[in-house]
Amino acid sequence: MASYDLIVIGGGPAGYVGAIRAAQLGKRVACIEKERAGGTCLNWGCIPTKALLKNAELYHTMKHHADDFGISFSNLKYDWEKVIKRSRSVSDQLAGGIEFLFKKNKIDYIRGVGGLAANGKVEVIDADGKSELHTTENVLVATGCVSRELPFLPFDSKKVIGSREAMNLPKQPKSITIIGAGAIGIEFAYFFNAYGTEVTVVEMVDTVLPIEDNEVSKTLEKSLIKQGINVMTSTKTVSADTSGKSVKLTVEPAEGGESQVLESEVVLVAIGIAPVLPNNSEQIKLERGFIDTDARYQTSVPNVFAAGDITGPPWLAHTGSYEAVQAVEGMFVEGHKPKQVGLFPACTYCHPEVASIGLTEEACKEQGLDYTVGKFPFAASGRALAVADSEGFVKMIFDKKHGEILGAHMIGGGATELIAEIGLAMNLEATAEEIEATIHAHPTLAEAIHEATSDAFGHAIHI
Amino acid sequence: MAAYVTMPKLSDTMSEGTLVKWLKSEGDTVGMDEEIAEVETDKATMAMPSFDEGVIHKIYVKEGETVPLGATLALILEDGEEPPADADTPPAPPVEEGSEETAAAPATDKAAAPAKPASAAITPALSSGGIRVKASPVARKLADELGIDLSRVRGTGPGGRIVKDDVEFAPVGGGGSNLGLLPSNDGLTDTNIPLTGMRRVIAERLLESKTTIPHFYLNIEVDTESLMDLRGKVNQASLANGGPKYTVNDFIMRSTVLATAAVPEVNASFMGDSVQQYGEVNLSVAVAIPDGLVTPVIRSAQNKSIKELATELKDLAVRARDKKLAPEEMLGGTITISNLGAFGIGHFDAIINPPQSAILSIGTITKLPVINDANQIVPGQRMWIGMSCDHRVIDGAVGARFLSELKRFIENPFLLIS
């Protein structure tokens, strides 16, 4: 038994970041993780899927566009096992990196399942079922989430799977039906389709990536269909038959109408995520199943704090890390008033990529804002044409009166990197003028941001 | 040749001026140095002389308008000269490169109108100290629109940076906006009074004084019987000869000057790493005027008789009320007298007038029963004098020594006739 200033339960992007920040502040810290440091993001989410998507994009380019680059070959093959292995090894490498950071910051890394115990104690149950108690002044719960299943379609880890299994399939499925067209569903749709799996995406609302700006969603939907994905929006899944070798899903139009049966080897359920509470957390007040926290990230139990996915949306690694740092600084930095997540970027890494920040045009309309929109297609960007990736556009939304940036929405290769400029600009409350006054390197994709900004005020040069 | 009249720099700290009144109209002939308008600066209202002669062809700035330094006010043509083609619109005022405001303002706005006074209002004091207001571009634009002075807004962004929210929730001032001011049920309404240049300076200087100078306060009771007796006789003689009538304050001024000469430690300024003791006594006297107060200075007061002091103060006070004081007439004081005796105030403590280290607060003369040397209760006259001291310069004993000197002079008024 040891005693700490802070015990973090969960070693994902909220947990490990919070632990390191507390250690930097000179606190004695332990981090409890039941699997591997890095959490879902690093082991079963953001990172391994990006590795898979890179493989997919490369293969897709070779298969469909090699000739555009003057490359020809007669024997293009891929090794599924190696595709998965590369993804796993990237995760392994990064998880090892986090474990090194724990050591470097003198954080006790405790493997096991964490739970709350009475009187400022935390209980850890290790893999052998052995229990150990640790005393601590503060607890940060950052236990995260797992994939949520459909009531009538429970996961079986073979035919009905979540994202975690989808990225680790031993064999490429011939066909897959993906329920849910959010970021996770769309990324896997792109991945499997690029390798030739027959992909159907079923989405209840009328567009893919429903939280994105409608213009972007529609453009992506067209692109995915062109790539060969069967996209069924405004469609709901009503029942499933998993008795045979394949899965038969009965779907019907969301508005009602004739149903149809979709048969596929595998069904990926990507409809959202469900909280993973620590042991003995009954006294913690929940809000729709997620932990309820106050302005200082404290739960209903004094000195027990929570951050990241376990506290509810947005379920993003980068907002989780931010929350954890705020929570920890609130605990240990005299006079620090923790901030809440306000502005954050959202990215989907299919091809073309989608990235956004701030308000969509629909939200601007709904709020009755006086806004102006500027757009620039990558088809008019020298760099995009040079790298043969000219699909998509940058869309900038400004407040008309002061030129305040209200939102930015991008679709195209590199969009997920480009969005960072707008994040900084919005955080600094820059206006259209500051973007226009910033010289953007030529030729770069980022010029599209500059041009879209000028376009909003009617003086773009290149369109 | 056509000459444009521009807003002149009438004081060191002036960054803008309000055109209070045109003394000439379009078509009037003006001579060199002839007064053409009254201008209010951050310090005072004063007459603006013409630097050219000719006929006023066009006036661009309306009475009551506030414009930055260098803004074009009027066009003067030589007799019979043809006006230039663009005479109807004033040329744009010169803008300082890289100044906060111009950097943020859209280029098209520059020519359209002179910069709004709001955010420029306080910058002289701040920018002379090299302090830059950190604010986001959106905050700047919003503040400009709402007429909010950013130097008065507390920033909550990183490093105290002013962000949009800070401006949105800032109290509106100076712009005459009525935000948040709703009529009450009984029909009474609140009024938002924009600050005049003078009120702004009073606010700034006194806030700085009260928050940065370690004030301490001394009070002393003075027997004024001999003084009043002497004053009565002096006035009788003076009036009989058609001379002026002397006020109690005239005698207090002379007493203060003599006491200051006797205890020169109070005639000093704190300079950060030294104390500057002044050779001359330059006496500042607080004068109430309709929308504020000014403290004109009687220079080299140690060389002046009661009569000279009285005459000079009268002249300064009259011109102060007419807003005709030149800014330099309010600069360079080394010690201040504030007298509220005429209003019946018994005693009070004043705020030091920086960079000085002491201010005297003079109360009213009261008739009251006193105990004389023979232990009898007799009618007497007393006056309270307060002294506010900067403890960095003046210690308690020094202040006390000064006040007892002052008391000695007032109670022995024959000493004043020297």
Image: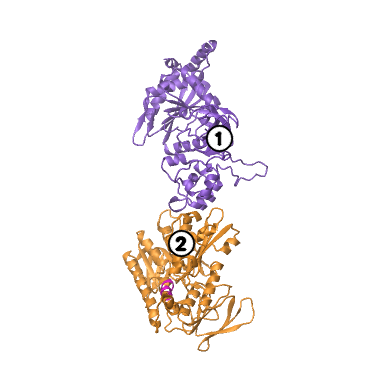
- What residue do we see at 58% from left, 64% from top? A362
Total residue callouts: 2
Question: Which chain comes out orange in the rendered image?
Answer: A
Q: Secondary structure at mark 1?
A: strand
Q: Which residues are magenta?
A: A45-53
Q: What percent of the width, then of the height, locates residue A86?
A: 37, 77
Quarter that holds the N terminus of chain A: bottom left
Q: Are marks 1 and 2 in contact (CB under 8 Å)?
A: no
- What residue do we see at 40% from left, 69% from top? A11
Q: Is residue A114 visible?
A: no
Q: What percent of the width, then of the height, locates residue B358?
A: 42, 30
Left or right of A352? Residue A234 is: right
Is the residue B233 above or below the residue A379 in the image?
Answer: above
Q: Mark 1 and mark 2, same subunit?
A: no
Query: For residue A447, which numbered disc appears in the image?
Result: 2
Left or right of A122? Residue A246 is: right
Chain ID at mark 1: B
**Quarter of the image holding residue B176?**
top right
Q: Is residue A323 visible?
A: yes
The foreground one among A1 and B153 is B153
User: Within 10 Å of the Cα at label 1, are there few (<14), some (14-19), or many (20+) other Cα atoms?
Assistant: many
Q: Mark 1 highlights which residue?
A: B74
Q: What percent of the width, then of the height, locates residue A8?
A: 40, 66
The foreground one among A393 and A419 is A393
Question: Which chain comes out purple in the rendered image?
Answer: B
The foreground one among A97 and A411 is A411
